[in-house]
Each structure stands twice: as structure tokens, then as C-alpha cells.
Image (spheres, rainbow, N blue to C red):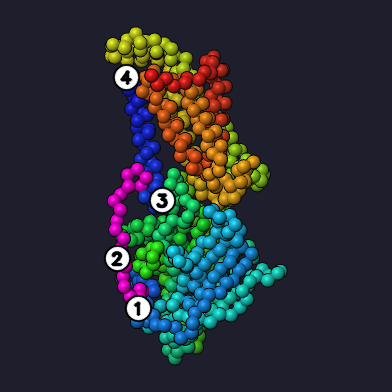
């Protein structure tokens, strides 16, 4: 009976791992690996010129204004152009049509696929749509104003000069509807947050009360270089004090099922992908309406992109007067300490999932270790060592229980052979042996189960930490965020996993014995495609577990021995 229970537990464990992996893929906005949903047909392309901005919330006057119709999108009188500006960490391409940011190259980060190139986060080119736009729309009084389709004039330097800490580039629109928009980008040395000042000048003879909109627009494709064996979230997100961090899958936006807070006076909107993000940030206390909408494209690569939009009403501007709204546009890596310094909640762009409460202190400890060791690889080893020390007594109880099981295993095997024709008596005799020897068959499981959330949280930390990109360890490991190019670490990880399995008590039932060896092998296959930092963490954990198990078995008078599989 006990053998049947073990078999059932192994089956449940295996099936649970499959379901957990499948739901993890879905949770992060990817297709299910094992139980994919039916593929939906692509939305049909819409002919003609599309709306430049989609309404935010039809029920409000603020949202009614956020729409530029096809009739308003007339050909500009002045030809548009694109210009490059750069700091020491960013190279940006800005379009005089609306003063929009259409390309952002991160000069300190190498591209995953081609190390000779830099990471390009925002990009508006053939096959890609990812841009940051702003403009002015009507409020209660109606009217047409400068939008991200309005061609502007540009002035100012294009690069950070030697010894200079910041510089500004100014885009000035013509007066439309009695409003002139002056948009000023300010780049600072070493900073990934860009100051974007919007000055609205009333050139008319009557007061106007327009609204500013801020939007991030991108296609729904995941960034290149991802893995089919683990997934990370790509898509829009909203943060407010009331509902905190709210990420939304592209598929939910397309179906009209996006669930997030629609109004707020704080927070930000963002587009998130693995390691990097962009975000529009307004000062606290500024009212805003939020929306996420799909937009049909005329593109040979993608037929749809998605917008996350933030609309903020501006107080009435008297004739001849002006009002200025300061905003920040973050375009850069998800470095946790830097994000924390910019605005509350921005550090959540580095998404640890449901175990954030455990992951954040683990990252804090990992960062402190790195400040001492100055090598992320050895910092991972040190962190796992500290965790093993913290959980030493729990592991000791588990391994002691396993040692007792191993000690009574010969009696169990002999009894099973003797009573193989009488299952009921076999079960009774087995329970009697366990009582006499004070052995709990499940005693080795519970201490380990308690630790699982901690190690899942550590997995999330290692997977989400951008500092691992291009971080070397030793010898041939030059990038802890990429798989081992020679598969040496995954092979060693597989060997340590099998060695740990061999040290455990061999189940009396042959089917259980097969499953005990099959599950580690199946689990190890995935690690051939995992980042080297994650594989190294698991190897360290395995080696320390084997050492602790060996010591405890020796102390309890149970000589360590390897129970090799018998598949007869």
C-alpha cells in the first residue's frame, strides 16, 4: 500500500510539474507548451488611415477628445525628418512629426544575438513598431490641437558635450486651434530617465482647456533571443497606489478584457520585456485617465500593435498665457536600485511574479554579496551557500528520515518478497516495521517542501536580474544570462542530480524506481537551454545537498551507498 502511495505521489508530482510549467507560460503571455489553446485568427486589416489616438474612456469628456480622425491627418506642409541625439548611455532617434521618440539604443548593453551591436529597445522600422508619443487633444470645449502627427521644428544640440552633465532639444509646433506645443527633451549623463517638458501656449483670444496625452505603442511580438523552455512577460503595465503593479497580456487587450485601474492621480504607464522597459511618469497629484487599446497596422510582419495611453487634463489657459507639464520618459534596463530612485513602484518593472515578497530580500542579499565579491557568478554560489546554512536543520531532518528509510530498506525488501502473495498482510507488516523503527515515510518530504518557495523566488531573481547579462564567471562562461555554449554545466548538473537520486533510499517497487530516475533526467533536459547562472545555482545546491546528506548518513551509522537503477 505504501508503494502505491509513493507511485501516486510521483505521478501527481510529475503531472503537477507539467501543469505548473504550462500555466507559467500562459501567465507570462506566451502560448501554452503542453496544452495550447486554439489559435485565433488574425484580425482583418482595416483599409484607410487609422486613428492616431484611440479614446481612453468613452464615458468621460476627457476620453472623448483623444481621437484624431482621418480628416485631420492631412499631409504636413513641412516635410518631416528624423534626427539622432545621444548621451553617454543612450542614442535616441526623434521624429519631427510630433517630436516622437522612434528609436532608443542602449549604449552600455550588447545585443543578445549579435554582441557587436547594442540593444535597441524602441524601434520604428520594417518589421518593428515600438515608439513613445505625446500630443494635445481637446477637453470639454472641443477643438483640434497639435498631436503626434503634427510636424514640428527642432532646435538645440544633438549630443552631450565633454564636461557637460545635460543638454536639451526643443520641438516647437505651429499654433493649431489656438494652442502651440513646445516639447523639450532633456538628457542627463548616465541617466536612462529623460525629462520631457510640455509647454502649452495659448495664442488665441479665448481661454482653452486642452489635455495632454502620453502613449507607448508597440507590436505584440516578443523580443528576439527568448527561450521556449522558460518565459518572461512582454506587454503593457500600469502602476497606481491603489492597485499597485498591474500587467496586462496583449491577448486580453485584443479581446477587450484588459483589467486595470482606469483613473488615478499617481503612478505610471509602461511597456515591459525581459531585462528592459519603457515608462511615462507624471508627478504625483496630476490627474490622469488610462487606457490600453489594439491598433490595426498596415504591416507585412504584424497586423496589430498595442497602445497604453495616459491622458491628463490641463487647467484652463488664459489668452497669451502658457502652462507647463513636466514628465519623465524612462527607457532602459530594469536595474532595481536605479528604478527605486526614480519614482515609487517603478522597481516593480523588474517582475518577480507572485513571490516578490521573498525575491526582493534575496536580490538585496545577492547585491550585497556582489559588492563584496565583485563577481556575479561567485555571488550566486555564496548566496546558495548561505541559504543552505539557513535551512541546515530542516534539511538535516529530511536527510535523517531518508537515512532511517535506507537502514530499514533491507527488512522491507525481504518482507515484500516473503509476502508478495498477500498484499494486505504486507501492508500491515510494513506499518509495523515503520512503527518499531520510528520511521516516517513522508518525513523527508515536508522539510524540503517548506523550502521550495524560497528557491522558486531565487530562480525568479536570477532570471530577472539584468546585471547577469554579459556578466562573466570563470573560464568559458562569459555571460551568465546565456546558456553554456559547450553544455558542460548542464551535463555536470545532470550528473549531480543523478548522484543525489542514487543516494536516496531505493523504492522497493520497480515502477517507483524507474520514475525516481526518469523524473530527474526529464527535469535536467530543460537545463541545457537555461541561462548559465541558473544552472550554476542548481549545481551548487545539488553539491551542497549531497555533502550534507553524506555527512548525516555517516553520523547515523548508515554507510552512504549508491542505489543504481534496475530496469529489469
Query: Which is nearer the N-term, disc 1 or disc 2?
Result: 2
Identify the residue position indicated by label 3 in the image: 28
First of labels 2, 4 by sequence position: 4
The residue indicated by pointer 1 is: 69
- Looking at marks 2 and 3 on the same chain, the residue that comes earlier in the sequence is marked by 3
Please provide percent x and percent y for residue 296. Answer: 35, 67
Q: Are marks 4 and 1 in contact (CB under 8 Å)?
A: no
133 drawn magenta: no
Label 1 to label 3: alpha-carbon separation = 35 Å
Q: Indicate whether 354 appears above or below 550.
A: below
The magenta-colored residue range is 32-51
Closer to the observer: label 2 or label 4? 2
Image coordinates of residue 383 in percent, x first then y, are 58, 39
* Screen quadrant of the N terminus: top left
Circle 2 sits on which residue? Answer: 44
Mark 1 vs mark 2: in front: 2
Amino acid at each position: 500500500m505504501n508503494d502505491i502511495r509513493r507511485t501516486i505521489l510521483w505521478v501527481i508530482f510529475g503531472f503537477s510539474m507539467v501543469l505548473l510549467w504550462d500555466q507559467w507560460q500562459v501567465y507570462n503571455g506566451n502560448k501554452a507548451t503542453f496544452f495550447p489553446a486554439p489559435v485565433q485568427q488574425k484580425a482583418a486589416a482595416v483599409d484607410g488611415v487609422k486613428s492616431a489616438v484611440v479614446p481612453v474612456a468613452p464615458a468621460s469628456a476627457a476620453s472623448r477628445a483623444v481621437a484624431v480622425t482621418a480628416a485631420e491627418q492631412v499631409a504636413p506642409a513641412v516635410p518631416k525628418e528624423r534626427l539622432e541625439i545621444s548621451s553617454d548611455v543612450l542614442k535616441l532617434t526623434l521624429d519631427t512629426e510630433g517630436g516622437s521618440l522612434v528609436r532608443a539604443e542602449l549604449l552600455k548593453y550588447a545585443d543578445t544575438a549579435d554582441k557587436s551591436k547594442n540593444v535597441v529597445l524602441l524601434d520604428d522600422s520594417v518589421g518593428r513598431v515600438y515608439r513613445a508619443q505625446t500630443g494635445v487633444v481637446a477637453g470639454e470645449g472641443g477643438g483640434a490641437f497639435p498631436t503626434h502627427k503634427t510636424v514640428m521644428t527642432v532646435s538645440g544640440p544633438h549630443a552631450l558635450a565633454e564636461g557637460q552633465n545635460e543638454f536639451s532639444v526643443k520641438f516647437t509646433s505651429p499654433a493649431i486651434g489656438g494652442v502651440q506645443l513646445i516639447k523639450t527633451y532633456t538628457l542627463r549623463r548616465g541617466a536612462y530617465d529623460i525629462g520631457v517638458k510640455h509647454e502649452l501656449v495659448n495664442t488665441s483670444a479665448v481661454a482653452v482647456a486642452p489635455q495632454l496625452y502620453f502613449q507607448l505603442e508597440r507590436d505584440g511580438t516578443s523580443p528576439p533571443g527568448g527561450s521556449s523552455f522558460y518565459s518572461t512577460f512582454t506587454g503593457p503595465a500600469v502602476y497606481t497606489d491603489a492597485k499597485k503593479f498591474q500587467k496586462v497580456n496583449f491577448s486580453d487587450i485584443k479581446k477587450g478584457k484588459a483589467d486595470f485601474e482606469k483613473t488615478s492621480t499617481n503612478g505610471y504607464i509602461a511597456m515591459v520585456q525581459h531585462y528592459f522597459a519603457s515608462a511615462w511618469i507624471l508627478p504625483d497629484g496630476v490627474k490622469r485617465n488610462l487606457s490600453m487599446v489594439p491598433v490595426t497596422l498596415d504591416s507585412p510582419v504584424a497586423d496589430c500593435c498595442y497602445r497604453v495611453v495616459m491622458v491628463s487634463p490641463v487647467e484652463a489657459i488664459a489668452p497669451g498665457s502658457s502652462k507647463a507639464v513636466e514628465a519623465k520618459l524612462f527607457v532602459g534596463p530594469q536595474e532595481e536600485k536605479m528604478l527605486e530612485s526614480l519614482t515609487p513602484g517603478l522597481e516593480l518593472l523588474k517582475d518577480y511574479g507572485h513571490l516578490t515578497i521573498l525575491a526582493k530580500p534575496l536580490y538585496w542579499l545577492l547585491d550585497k554579496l556582489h559588492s563584496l565579491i565583485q563577481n556575479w557568478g561567485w555571488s550566486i554560489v555564496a548566496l546558495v551557500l548561505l541559504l543552505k546554512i539557513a535551512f541546515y536543520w530542516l534539511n538535516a531532518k529530511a536527510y535523517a528520515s531518508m537515512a532511517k528509510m535506507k537502514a530499514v530498506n533491507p527488512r522491507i525488501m525481504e518482507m515484500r518478497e516473503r509476502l508478495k502473495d498477500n498484499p494486505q498482510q504486507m501492508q500491515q507488516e510494513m506499518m509495523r516495521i515503520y512503527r518499531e523503527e520510528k520511521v516516517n515515510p513522508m518525513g523527508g518530504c515536508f522539510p524540503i517542501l517548506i523550502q521550495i518557495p524560497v528557491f522558486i523566488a531565487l530562480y525568479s531573481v536570477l532570471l530577472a536580474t539584468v546585471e547577469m547579462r554579459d556578466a562573466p564567471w570563470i573560464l568559458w562562461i562569459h555571460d551568465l544570462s546565456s546558456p553554456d555554449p559547450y553544455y558542460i554545466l548542464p551535463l555536470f548538473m545532470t550528473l549531480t542530480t543523478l548522484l543525489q537520486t542514487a543516494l536516496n533510499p531505493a523504492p522497493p517497487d520497480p515502477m517507483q524506481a524507474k520514475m525516481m530516475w526518469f523524473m530527474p533526467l526529464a527535469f535536467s533536459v530543460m537545463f541545457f537551454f537555461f541561462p548559465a547562472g541558473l544552472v550554476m545555482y542548481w549545481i551548487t545546491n545539488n553539491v551542497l545537498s549531497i555533502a550534507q546528506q553524506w555527512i548525516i548518513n555517516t553520523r547515523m551509522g548508515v554507510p552512504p551507498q549508491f542505489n543504481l537503477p534496475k530496469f529489469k
